Amino acid sequence: MKDPGRYDYLPLIDRPIIRWPNGARVAFWVAPNIEFYELDPPDGQGRPLWPRPYPDVLNYSLRDYGNRAGVWRVMEALERFGVRASVSLNAAMCDHMPEIVDECVRLKWELFSHGIYNTRLIYGMSEDEVRHVIRDSVETIKRHSGQSVAGWLAPALSSTETFFDLLPEFGIKYTIDMVPDDQPVPIKVRSGRLISIPYSTEINDVRVMGVRGYPADKWAAMMKAFFDQVYREGADNGMVVCMPLHPFVVGQPHRIDALNDILRHVTSHDHVWLATAREIADWYYEHNYDAAVTFRASTKAQKP
Amino acid sequence: MNTGRLTYRHRRRGLDHDWFAHETNVRRAPIAWPGGKRVALWITVPVEFFPLDAQPQPFRPLGGLTLGYPDLWNYSSRDYGLRVGIYRIMRVLDGLGLRATAATNASVAERHPRVMDEIIRRNWEIMANGVDMGQLHYGKLAIEDERRLIVRASEILANAAGKPIAGWHSPGRSQSENTLRLLAETGFEYVTDWANDDLPYTVTTTAGQLCAMPLTYELSDRLLLVQHNLMVEDYEAAVLAAFHRLLAEAEQNRGGRILSLSISPWILGYPHRIATFERLLGRILATDGVWHANGTEIVTAFKSQVASVR
């Protein structure tokens, strides 16, 4: 396919207005990716899982750092500023390290599905195989936490052409697998309803600090600039800012103060809705989804 | 359905291997450093030889020679570390009364006895860093070949040091699935390849136990200054941020912490960086609660407090 065909072109300057609760300009949500990377995952998944041959002790252990040390620093920072996170959770974490998942529940964090492992990609899977992954993750998280999963991010940014169509079958309301907007976007699916909630690869800690290697204070400056701009724009039309996190990156001792700095900045603003992704989705479905779809169907919406 | 990707052999409590148990920093018993100090300052200096004809077996380690053969530029800039950079680092550490742990390729002991004399004269601890940067340990390396590499490095360095070597660092932080067992079998006490913790922990192999020591990767000069192309001022800021965070955690009665630095003669030993490094160390040492220790001293303190895992 030349185009995912999942949403219509709806320019920033020409779309319905979103009003968040209590006059908030920005819905701010935090997405820690709590992940398990297998030391010896199956081969032949469409791309190499580790940069070095088995056993890639260096890269495996760098990720394990997040679960041994980093995640606790992230939890402490968010709790300090009264921010609840929405966790992109590899469901196998419920089996491997349930104490971490328990702590997320205690903190009243939302858990959403990030597949089973970050080393099990969905590229090339049949729809039934993808259903197997979605069902397993939803049931595992439900069994462990009591939470009904509302969101989905495919493991390690893998994808198929049709996995969006399968998500509503399992009660999933939102996807963060695309980043086309600073507002939620209705996603066309075979049946049921699905929306895209803004996420970010652009200001993602793993990309900014892990891959590109920028210092933590530069990441904090980027994140604050992003927030400040959207906060100004949100006075006219409510917007979303997502802060994606990876405990193995931001949970390092030389970086965690940057997270505290960002949270201090964001929470010092009056017109911010500190929300979970599920809360944003629920509000949007109740107040904005129909208007967006109607608008889309009107002559103003252009086909790509 | 093709079930290969839907079968999870190691989906269970804990980790997906048996080398050590999953533990989390916040639930472990606090460690106390000697004299009630808060943060152990552990400085490791990699003392490395990058052979001109090294093959990417199976990859080039960070710092490996990347231009076409013969890569005189990278070869000689690494060699700068052994001719010039390490002596600058020694001068700085001497001036501050600090000793390093020298993660030494055995080839350096054979090629540069002068460097070894200066390391030994300063009472730096010698840690084995394999044979050299062209001989990596990796998954498909035959166990007999790997055993030979480990024994050879151990013997050459013990001979140079005049005593057994306690610590091991694999060149390029690369291991095979046999490395830990072979290290225990050869008599090593601690290993520094895993980058998953801020504190020591116990590794169990069929040949005995090892202590895994948290030699920094994230704060190493080769990651920040070479791989990420940062300025030395960014390096300084990152180390100070880590130091203040670790100090704060120790002061919240969470136990002693370790500030691990990895200082390469061919990176921080350059004239435009060394003064910043010296200033950084001065700031750290001006703070109360710093315990200056080498690898073996930290392992000894850790082992005296933690019941070994069977």
Image (cartoon, grey):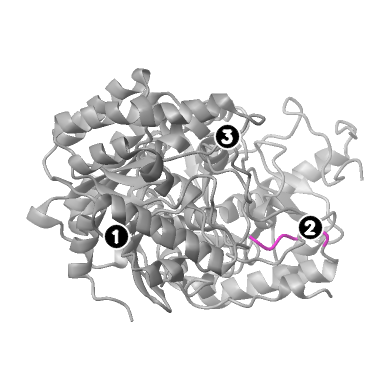
Residue type, label 2: Tyr
Towards the viewer: B187 or B190: B187
Q: Amino acid at mark 3?
A: Leu
Q: Secondary structure at mark 2?
A: loop
Q: Position of residue B281 (x, y in %)?
A: 22, 32
Q: Which mark is residue A123?
A: 2
The span picked out in magenta is A119-124
Q: Earlier in the sequence, mark 3 or mark 1?
A: 3
Q: Is residue A121 magenta?
A: yes
- Image location of residue B250, percent across then percent down: 20, 52
Q: Is A55 situated above or below A225?
A: below
Give the CA distance from mark 2 to mark 3: 35 Å
Q: Nearer the viewer, residue A182 or B242?
A: B242
Label of residue B65 in the image: 3
Q: Picture quarter containing residue B47?
A: top left
Q: Is residue A199 left or right of residue B246?
A: right
**Which disc number belongs to residue B166?**
1
Q: What separation in Å lies between label 3 and label 1 (alpha carbons)?
A: 29 Å
Query: What is the chain letter for disc 3?
Result: B
Residue B9: horizontal and vertical position, in percent? 63, 78
Residue A21 as seen in the image, left or right of residue B194: right
Classified by dominant secondary structure, the portion drawn in magenta counts as loop
